[in-house]
Amino acid sequence: MFRKSSIVFAFFAAAFITGCFGSQPTWRKEGVSAEDAHSALAKCKYEVGLNKIPKESQQELIENCMEGQGFRSR
C-alpha cells in the first residue's frame, strides 16, 4: 500500500510542478509565428537588461515593450 501511494504522490507532484513552470504568459499577435513572438520577447528582455532596470520593474517594462509591438498576453 505504501508503494502505491508513493507512486500516486510522485505523479501528482510532477503534474503540479509542471503546471507551475508552464504558467508563463504566451504572447500572440495576428500573423506572427510563435518563433517570431519568442524573438520579440527576447529582444525586449535584452533591452530592459541593457538599461540596468531594478528587478522589481523589469517584468512590467517587458510587458509594455511587447504590447507596444502589438503583442497580447494570453
Image (tube, rainbow, N blue to C red):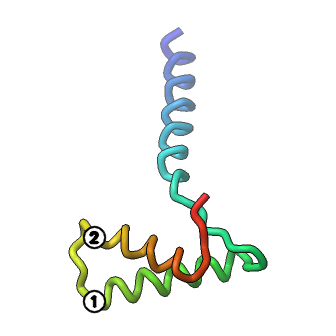
Q: Residue furthest right?
A: 31
Secondary structure category for the residue under label 2: helix
Q: Residue 13 in the image: x percent, y percent?
A: 49, 33
Secondary structure category for the residue under label 1: loop
For the residues bearing labels 2 and 1, Cβ distance under 8 angstroms: no
Q: Is residue 14 above or below residue 36?
A: above
Q: Residue 22 in the image: x percent, y percent?
A: 55, 52
Query: Going 52% across and 16% down the picture, which residue do you hit?
Result: 5
Q: Residue furthest top?
A: 1
Q: Amino acid at mark 1?
A: Asn
Give left or right: position of 57 versus 13: left
State which tag comes first along the sequence, 2 or 1.
1
Position of the N terminus, as image quadrant, is top right
Q: Residue 27 in the image: x percent, y percent?
A: 60, 68
Give left or right: position of 27 versus 43: right
Q: Mark 2 = which residue?
A: 57
Where residue 25 is drawn, which disc sits there? none
Q: Is residue 20 above or below residue 46?
A: above
Query: How many neighbours does mark 2 have within 10 angstroms: few (below 14), some (14-19), or many (20 or more)?
Result: few
Query: Going 28% across and 70% down the picture, which residue do you hit?
Result: 57
Instruction: Find residue 7 and report its image quarter.
Output: top right
